[in-house]
Structures are given as structure tokens and as C-alpha cells.
Image (cartoon, rainbow, N blue to C red):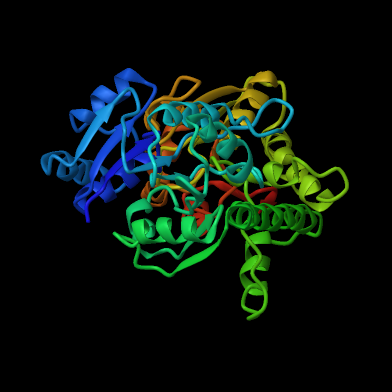
């Protein structure tokens, strides 16, 4: 039976989720606090780069099942998908979740379902959110349903993963979890696992904490490989041939809205546990400093050299720059008096000025590749080299074909190792 669903937050996950429910026949109200964004989405304009999003949004609007509003309306279901960034002291900023809850409480009705999809510290759903929703004078878990179902999708592949990924749904009661599960069955083809809300919160945090710790290990191994004159990417590739080993790839740092943030959420309320998690964060946060030091070692310092920065998105083939290590690296290089030409195939708006590819490489003394966009693989090193002052490439992602670039006369480095 079609329901009226109010989705709060029309970002990287909220907007695709709203579209998915709309094309399944539900009446969806998409709510965001940014009036310009609400108006643009209502006209079918997308503000993020995501495969299939524009087509899906247009289909949802044409079906008359999706409208956008600046404020919350009464509905059967409320899905909260708002940002939960870090504060300066590495704690969860739950301001947006709190505001979302307070906007729902006045219109909450018996038998409504409220689902928190935003990533939060353990206990937030059953604690803070339920306390706020109880201001409606209705009792959570008795008069209305509350659940947490963390988003677990990869930018650039959101629609596929919304459908095929397994889903964890945690309720503050078992009937709450069952109610949320029945809703997601509208489009989820993966298996849906039921649990309590706090466990569901910790599942998402555990997934990304595991990845962060694994990347920290890879970055430490990269340091050790460099000291021994070995290729870290070959080491990882061969080690992963063992059926019980899965070492992640090293890189210039960890970015995105999840991996560099979620580990802090899971240790936030613990004084004694989590030392490994905190140390892994320290290692990955320091990775950009190591990249700047590598540039200084290879190119030389304080000589006014120009570095062509390739990629500012935190990962390949997306336009997402949230928590990107490129920002730290650029600031570090600028402080060392390097001239920079910054280029990205996908990103259009960034905190520093972006150049065209030609502007970026013209007169450059080195290329520093920070993002493994697929387009970089197909560039002609002979053409690029003719525009540069010196032919040097520092590849931090194992993205480029070293043999092809060396044949074109480049000194080619994987991190610190000359190939």
C-alpha cells in the first residue's frame, strides 16, 4: 500500500532514496533547509554527480510522486538523512539530527514510522532522537515506531547498491524494526537483517572503522616498503593472493563523509577502549603530510617549482570532495612556496581555484596524482610532457601505467619509490 514518506535531507543519500521510493509508487516529500536546493531539485536539476540520478529524479517528478518542500509535512514515514560532521574536538555534531527530530515532533501522529539513516554514535536513536520525538506527547515504541537503518552505499554507484546491498535495520523495539523492514522491501533486493537500534548504529561504524584501520596498516607498510626500496602496491597485490589476507590500498590520506569520521563516533563515549582506532586515525590524518614531504624530497624545496595536482575528489570517478586529503596537501605545498596548477575531471567547485588540464601542466616541474579518475589513465604522456618544464610524475594511487610514462621520458614515482 503506497505511503506518504517525508525524506529530510536531499544530499548524496537522501535524494536518491527519495527518488527510489517515489518511482516505487509512494508519495514522497523531499525536505531540505536550503531553499535554493529545494527549488532546483523540484525542477529536476541535480547538484551532485551520481550515475543515473538525473534520469531517476526526472522519472520521480514526472510520476508526480515526488515534490520538494522547505519544511516538514505530516506523513506516514519520516526518513532522516542529514549530515553528521565532526566538531573541532572530534565529536559528532548532531545539530542537524536534532533539528530534524524537532521538526518532525509537531506533526507526528500515532503509528507513524521515523527512520534515522544518518550515521551517529551508539545510542543516539534510542536516546537523543527518541527524547526529542517524545515532545510530541506520543510514546516512542508504543504510539509510533522508531528505527535506525544506516546508509551503506558507495558514491558513484548509489542506485545499484540501494537495491542490491544487504540492509541492517535496528528498531527500538522488534515491531519497530519489522515496520521499517517492510518499508524497505519496496526496493531492497538484498537480505534485510533485523536487530536493535544501537547494534545497527555500531554495525555501520564498525564497517568503516575496519576500513580505516586497514588503510592505516597499508600506509604504515608503504613507509616500510619505501625504506626497503620495495613497491608497496606489488606487495599488497601479492599478499592479497593469500585467501585469508585482504590488505587495503595505501594512498595520500582518507577522505569522504564516512571513513575519516565514523571511527571517532564509535570511540566518542569511551575513555578506556579504542586506542588502536585512535592511533589509526592519527596515521591516516598524517598521510597528507607525508605526501608533501615526498614532493619536497623529489622536486626540491623553496625553489618556486610548479606542481600539477591531478585530482581533488577524495576518490576516483566522483565529484565528492568531503574530507578530501587533497585540501591538506595543497595547503601544505602552498606553505612551502610551490606554485600549483590544480585540475580535476569531475569536480567543478572547490575551495581553491581549479585550472584546465592544459593550464595545470604548462610549465610544471612535476605531476602529483592524488585521485584515480579513470580519465587520467588515457592521457598521452608525450603530449603532456611537451607542456611541462620537467618530466616527473608522483603517483599516489597506482593509477598510471609507469612503463608508458617512462617511455615518454618521465621520472616515475609510486609514492617515494622510483620505478
Q: Is residue 107 placed above or below 397 in the rendered structure?
A: above
Front residue of this view, candidates 204 and 21: 21
Q: Residue 305: x, y in percent? A: 61, 24
Q: Is residue 400 placed above or below 255 in the rendered structure?
A: below
Residue shown at the point (58%, 32%) measured from the top left = 85
Q: Residue 415: x, y in percent? A: 66, 48
Q: Residue furthest bottom?
A: 243
Label total for image: 0
Q: Quadrant of the C terminus?
A: bottom right
Q: Residue 238: x, y in percent? A: 64, 73
Q: Is residue 2 placed above or below 165 in the rendered structure?
A: above
Residue shown at the point (19%, 51%) measured from the top left = 25
Q: Give the quarter of the image for residue 81.
A: top left
Q: Give the quarter of the image for residue 104.
A: top left
Q: Residue furthest right?
A: 272
Can residue 290 be seen by looking at this rendering?
no
Residue shown at the point (65%, 26%) measured from the top left = 333
Q: Residue 76: x, y in percent? A: 32, 43
Say left or right for 240 vs 356: right
Can residue 376 be seen by looking at this rendering?
yes
Q: Give the quarter of the image for residue 106.
A: top left
Q: Quadrant of the N terminus?
A: bottom left
Front residue of this view, candidates 303 and 134: 134
Amino acid at each position: 500500500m503506497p505511503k506518504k514518506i517525508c525524506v529530510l535531507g536531499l544530499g548524496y543519500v537522501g535524494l536518491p532514496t527519495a527518488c527510489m521510493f517515489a518511482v516505487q509508487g509512494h508519495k514522497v516529500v523531499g525536505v531540505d533547509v536550503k531553499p535554493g536546493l529545494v527549488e532546483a531539485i523540484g525542477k529536476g536539476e541535480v547538484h551532485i554527480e551520481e550515475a543515473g540520478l538525473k534520469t531517476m529524479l526526472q522519472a520521480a517528478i514526472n510520476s508526480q510522486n515526488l515534490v520538494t518542500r522547505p519544511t516538514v509535512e505530516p506523513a506516514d514515514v519520516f526518513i532522516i538523512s542529514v549530515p553528521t560532521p565532526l566538531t573541532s574536538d572530534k565529536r559528532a555534531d548532531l545539530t542537524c539530527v536534532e533539528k530534524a527530530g524537532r521538526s518532525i515532533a509537531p506533526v507526528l501522529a500515532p503509528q507513524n514510522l521515523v527512520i534515522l539513516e544518518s550515521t551517529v554514535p551508539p545510542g543516539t536513536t534510542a536516546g537523543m532522537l527518541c527524547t526529542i520525538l517524545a515532545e510530541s506527547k506520543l510514546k516512542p515504541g508504543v504510539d509510533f515506531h522508531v528505527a535506525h537503518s544506516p546508509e551503506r552505499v558507495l558514491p558513484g554507484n548509489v542506485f545499484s547498491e540501494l537495491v542490491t546491498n544487504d540492509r541492517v535495520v535496528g528498531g527500538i523495539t522488534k515491531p519497530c524494526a519489522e515496520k521499517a523492514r517492510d518499508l524497505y522491501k519496496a526496493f531492497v533486493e538484498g537480505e534485510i537483517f533485523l536487530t536493535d537500534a544501537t547494534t545497527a548504529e555500531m554495525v555501520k561504524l564498525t564497517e568503516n572503522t575496519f576500513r580505516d584501520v586497514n588503510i592505516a596498516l597499508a600506509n604504515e607498510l608503504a613507509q616500510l616498503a619505501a625504506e626497503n626500496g620495495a613497491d608497496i602496491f606489488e606487495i599488497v597485490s601479492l599478499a592479497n593472493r593469500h585467501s585469508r589476507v585482504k590488505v587495503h590500498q595505501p594512498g595520500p590520506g582518507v577522505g569522504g563523509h564516512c571513513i575519516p569520521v565514523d571511527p571517532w563516533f564509535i570511540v566518542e563515549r569511551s575513555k578506556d577502549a579504542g586506542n588502536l582506532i585512535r592511533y589509526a586515525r592519527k596515521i591516516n590524518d598524517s598521510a597528507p603530510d607525508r605526501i608533501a614531504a615526498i614532493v619536497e624530497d623529489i622536486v626540491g624545496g623553496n625553489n618556486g617549482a610548479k606542481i600539477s595536482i591531478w585530482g581533488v575528489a577524495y576518490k576516483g570517478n566522483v565529484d565528492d570532495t568531503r574530507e578530501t586529503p587533497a585540501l591538506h596537501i595543497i595547503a601544505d605545498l602552498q606553505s612551502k612556496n610551490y606554485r600549483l596548477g590544480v585540475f580535476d575531471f569531475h569536480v567543478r567547485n572547490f575551495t581553491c581555484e581549479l585550472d584546465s588540464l592544459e593550464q595545470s601542466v604548462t610549465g610544471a616541474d612535476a605531476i602529483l596524482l592524488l585521485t584515480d579518475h579513470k580519465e587520467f589513465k588515457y592521457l598521452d604522456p608525450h603530449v603532456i610532457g611537451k607542456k611541462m618544464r620537467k618530466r616527473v610524475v608522483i603517483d599516489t594511487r597506482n593509477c598510471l601505467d609507469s612503463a608508458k610514462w617512462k617511455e615518454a621520458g618521465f621520472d616515475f614515482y609510486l609514492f617515494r619509490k622510483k620505478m
